[in-house]
Image: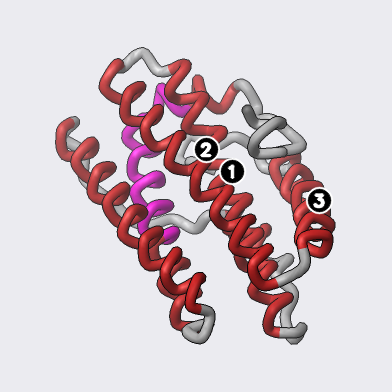
């Protein structure tokens, strides 16, 4: 799925899922914050581009869904006797976001924002698939299967939305560039026991 639907250039290091299973509390905490940040990102897009009607409609639905995911991760933490814990910086997102071009035309900036969000969703989807297929906890397997399907839909939505505001060929070319950048970021990030990305 990673290469076909999501078009990711580099698969996750296979060691990551083993590290994740041994540190499931840390992974769930980081996952909760990832969902919260995804909802916040959607709100930021609405605030920045209120004149883009389709974007506002789609981001409103996405924010509601991401927040429900945040609530679901909180439930999984509570079920296991874990607490939310402190937020931690997401180096993957920080590095990827540096490639959103500043001072460019408004529509190009919007396209970059949407495509960076698409790639974050794609990588999350790929990682959720690994958790679904490899975790030994059947409840968490089901949980991550459901979220994997949802994240794949978000990835597609972000790319389609970018094509609402910029020509298809421009979006495809920029997505190709960002996919290469994303692969390079992943290649240089060490798998960590306390990070979803």
Q: Element type at marker 2?
A: helix
Percent across and percent down for residue 94 are: 61, 61
Marked residue nearer the N-terminal end (1 or 3): 1
**Placement of 158 over or under 51, stated as above or below:** above
Q: Is residue 134 magenta?
A: no
**Placement of 88 over or under 110, stated as above or below:** above
Q: Is residue 29 magenta?
A: yes
Residue behind mark 1: 122
Please indicate whether residue 79 sits to the left or right of residue 106 in the image: left
Which region is colored magenta? 20-38
Residue at 32% across, 24% down: 142
Residue at 35% across, 22% down: 141
User: How far is disc 2 from disc 1 in space, using C-alphas?
Assistant: 5 Å
Residue at 23% across, 36% down: 76
Residue behind mark 3: 176
Residue behind mark 2: 125
* Quadrant of image for the C terminus: top right
Percent across and percent down for residue 56 are: 44, 74
User: How far is disc 1 from disc 3 in space, using C-alphas?
Assistant: 14 Å
Percent across and percent down for residue 87 are: 37, 57
Specify how the rendered protein is coloured: secondary structure
* Callouts 2 and 1 close, C-beta under 8 Å: yes
Q: Splitting the image into 4 quarters, where does residue 29 fall? A: top left
**Placement of 32 over or under 76, stated as above or below:** below
User: How far is disc 3 from disc 2 in space, using C-alphas?
Assistant: 18 Å
Residue at 32% across, 30% down: 143
């Amino acid at each position: 799925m990673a290469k076909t639907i999501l078009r990711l250039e580099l698969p996750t290091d296979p060691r990551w899922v083993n590290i994740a299973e041994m540190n499931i509390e840390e992974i769930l905490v980081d996952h909760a914050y990832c969902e919260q940040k995804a909802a916040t990102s959607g709100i930021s897009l609405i605030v920045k581009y209120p004149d883009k009607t389709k974007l506002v409609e789609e981001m409103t639905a996405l924010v509601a869904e991401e927040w429900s995911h945040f609530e679901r991760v909180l439930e999984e933490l509570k079920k296991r006797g874990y607490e939310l814990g402190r937020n931690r910086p997401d180096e993957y997102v920080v590095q990827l976001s540096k490639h959103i071009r500043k001072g460019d035309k408004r529509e190009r900036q919007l396209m970059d924002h949407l495509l960076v969000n698409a790639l974050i969703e794609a990588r999350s989807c790929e990682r959720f698939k690994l958790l679904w297929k490899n975790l030994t906890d059947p409840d968490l397997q089901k949980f991550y299967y459901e979220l994997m399907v949802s994240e794949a839909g978000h990835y597609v939505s972000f790319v389609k939305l970018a094509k609402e505001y910029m020509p298809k060929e421009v979006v495809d070319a920029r997505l190709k560039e960002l996919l290469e950048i994303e692969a390079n970021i992943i290649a240089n990030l060490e798998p960590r026991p306390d990070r979803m990305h």
